[in-house]
Image (cartoon, rainbow, N blue to C red):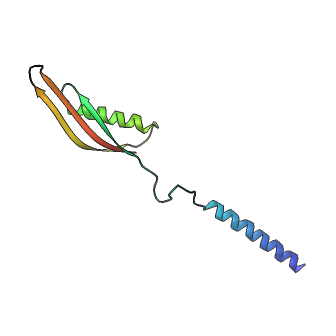
Amino acid sequence: MIIKRLRLLVISSLICLTAVVAMFAIVPGRSSAQPQTTEQGFIGMDDRGDFQRALRDAIAKAQETAGCCDRLVTYRVMEVQGQVGGFAGVNQIRVTIMASW
C-alpha cells in the first residue's frame, strides 16, 4: 500500500516537473532578453527643398517596410544633402535616416 502511494507520488511529481520545464523551456533561436530589432537606412527626397517633406518621405518608406499597422519605428537623421540654383533652378533636398523597429 505504501509502495503504491510512493509510486503515485513519484509519477505525479515527474509529471508536474515536466510541465514546469515545458512552460519555461527556451525555444532555440529566440532570446528571452529583448525582442529582435531590424535596422535599415531610408532616403527621402523633395524637389522644392522642403526638409520636412523629405523627412516625412523617408519615414513613410520606413513605416511601409516595417509592415504591421501599429509598429513603432524609431529613426535618426544620418545625413542631409541638397542642391539649389543653377540654370535649371534646382531646389532638391535629400534626407537619409536610419530606422529600426
Q: Is residue 9 above or below residue 86?
A: below
Residue 38 placed where, x, y %?
A: 40, 46
How many marks are shown on the rendered structure? 0
Q: Residue 42 location, x and y as percent?
A: 31, 37
| Residue 95: x %, y % from top left | 24, 36
> Which residue corresponds to the image point at 41% horizontal and 36% vertical from the top-left?
65
Residue under the image location 20 percent in, 38 percent down: 80
Question: Going 35% across and 34% down the picture, which residue do you hit?
Answer: 61
Q: Above or below — where is 35 with respect to 88?
A: below
Q: Is 34 positioned to the left or the right of 77 in the image?
A: right
**Quadrant location of the N terminus?**
bottom right
| Residue 87 placement: quadrant | top left
Quarter of the picture holding the C terminus: top left
User: Residue 46: horizontal and vertical position, in percent?
Assistant: 23, 28
Q: Is residue 82 left or right of residue 73?
A: left
Left or right: 35, with 43 as reference point: right
Outermost residue on the bottom side: it is: 2
